Amino acid sequence: MNCQKCKGLMIEEQRPELAPESVVHRCINCGLVLDPLIQRNRLSSRPRKDSFMRAA
Ligand SMILES: [Zn+2]
């Protein structure tokens, strides 16, 4: 898997503080973190004022 930003190598990294079994991808080159859980939530959730404020 390559970074969307710099095409660098991305490694899997465990993030127990986010979710017990969550694994994110982190770019070892630029530090970009891809969180599949957060991305899924953004896609599935409707644009409500509540989530909009949290994102900002
Ligand atoms: Zn990168």
Image: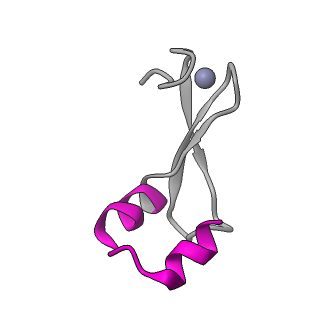
Residue 9: image quadrant is top right
Q: Which residues are magenta?
A: 38-56
| Quadrant of the drawing holding the N terminus | top left
Q: Quadrant of residue 40?
A: bottom left
State the residue at coordinates (56%, 31%): 11
Give the overall secondary structure of the magenta segment.
helix
Closer-to-camera residue (32/21): 32
Q: Residue at x 39, y 67 (%)?
A: 41
Place of residue 4 in the rendered image (x, y in percent of width and height, measured from the top left): 47, 25
Q: Is residue 7 magenta?
A: no
The percent coordinates of residue 16 (x first, y second) are 64, 65
Where on the image, by quarter, is ligand 1?
top right
User: Residue at position x 40%, y 63% from top?
Assistant: 42
Residue situated in front as seen by the camera: 15 or 33: 33
Q: How is the image coloured?
A: one colour
Residue 15, image x, y percentages: 63, 57
Number of marks present in the image shown: 0
Indicate whether residue 52 is drawn in magenta: yes
